[in-house]
Image (cartoon, grey):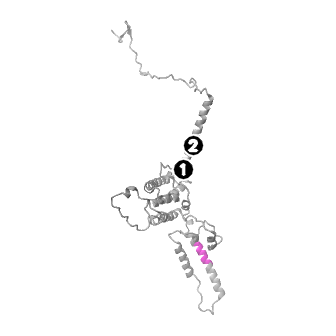
Amino acid sequence: MAGKPQYQVVIRGLCETVKPPVYHPWRNSYRTFSSSICRSKSEKKPRRVSEDSYAYHQSRQRKAANVTRQTELREQRATALGDPIRGVTTPFVESLGSALPPETTTSDEELANATPSLSPKRPPPSPAFAADEDHLNYYITKPEFEESLDYSRVLSEPLVSLERELADPAKEAEDAKAHEASHQTAYEAISRIVSLGNANNKERTRANIQRIIETFGRHNTDFQLKPKAPSLQATYSTTAELTATPRAGPDTGSSEVQIGILTAKIRVLADRYEGANRNDKVNKRNLRLLLHRRQKLLKYMYKKERGSQRWTNMIEKLGLTEATWKGQIEVK
């Protein structure tokens, strides 16, 4: 048969001729099907409300109470974890800002026996004076400072005439008074120079590192804090116990010392980042690196020294919370 092919379909014994389907290239060759009828927003059925209004309102109240309780628990957990960057503020941590030891309370008798200040117009705490500080700048100790000033005072004293018959007592008294005033001025000037209250961040950080080494170094804490009790495995071990190498010099490499040094540096970077330099990407990256480095050391020390006096002393003085070594630390 010429033309388009035709097909025969047999339906219940009847023979019919059916034309083949026509293909249109501008139409889709497939058709989508859905299991449910698509309705517009206006045709959607409204949500069925429970017929018992009392039970419905009771369920809504229970849900609101659960949401409120979840919010309270979330806030309590966040407060318990603390700040992952700064932790909790302690007197030792506050003293890192001025690089001076925390103030100690003195009794009335100590205040009465204390020597009066050299100048009544000195404005504490800034500018700070070396006479009120045990830690000075430029690696100077308090005995060295006092000894040097006393020596300079002796060298600068006015000469006394050996011929007392020709000497003028009034002029000698006037020279001695001028020398005393000059020495007082020099004393206050040098005190301001060597004071950590007038130092920059770099010098304060250097002084803080020295304080941290003396506070948490094991060359001092081994005589003050009890070591951690040995484990059962170490107690019943048959292997020979290794003898520790004697320490030479101050301890600068133990975990608690490194954690304290990182905490001091983190506070400096955090103060700078939270200020006007919020968009300082380099500072943000350096802060993140120090935080993760401290987190690794804290995890290691938590595993090795958890529950010991060494761990408790470090956590209490530095104000570190669980957020500083648990979970993920983000710098936003």
Residue 59, position in %: x, y?
59, 33
Total numbered labels: 2
Amino acid at the residue labelled 1: Ala
Outermost residue toward the right in this view? 170
Provide residue 128's location: percent of width, then percent of height: 59, 67
Give the image location of residue 120, x and y in percent.
Answer: 65, 71
Disc 1 secondary structure class:
helix
Please report the bounds of the magenta region as a residue range: 181-189
How many residues crowd around disc 1 within 10 Å: few (fewer than 14), some, or many (20 or more)? few
Name the one closer to the observer, 283 or 234. 234
Asked whether, in this view, residue 151 is left or right of residue 250, the answer is right
Residue 53 in the image, given as x and y percentages of width and height: 62, 29
Q: Which residue is mark 1?
A: 80
Q: In the image as oriented, which residue stretches furthest toward the bottom?
A: 165
For mark 2, what is the residue? 71
Residue in front for this viewpoint, 158 or 266: 266
Q: Amino acid at mark 2?
A: Thr
Q: Is residue 118 visible?
A: no
> Is 94 above or below relative to 35?
below
Q: Residue at x 61, y 75 (%)?
A: 185
Which quadrant would residue 11 be assigned to in this image? top left
Which callout, 1 or 2, points at the residue further toward the start of the chain?
2
Q: Is residue 331 magenta?
A: no
Q: Is 259 rendered above or below residue 40?
A: below
Q: Quadrant of the N terminus?
A: top left
The quarter of the displayed image where residue 30 is located: top left
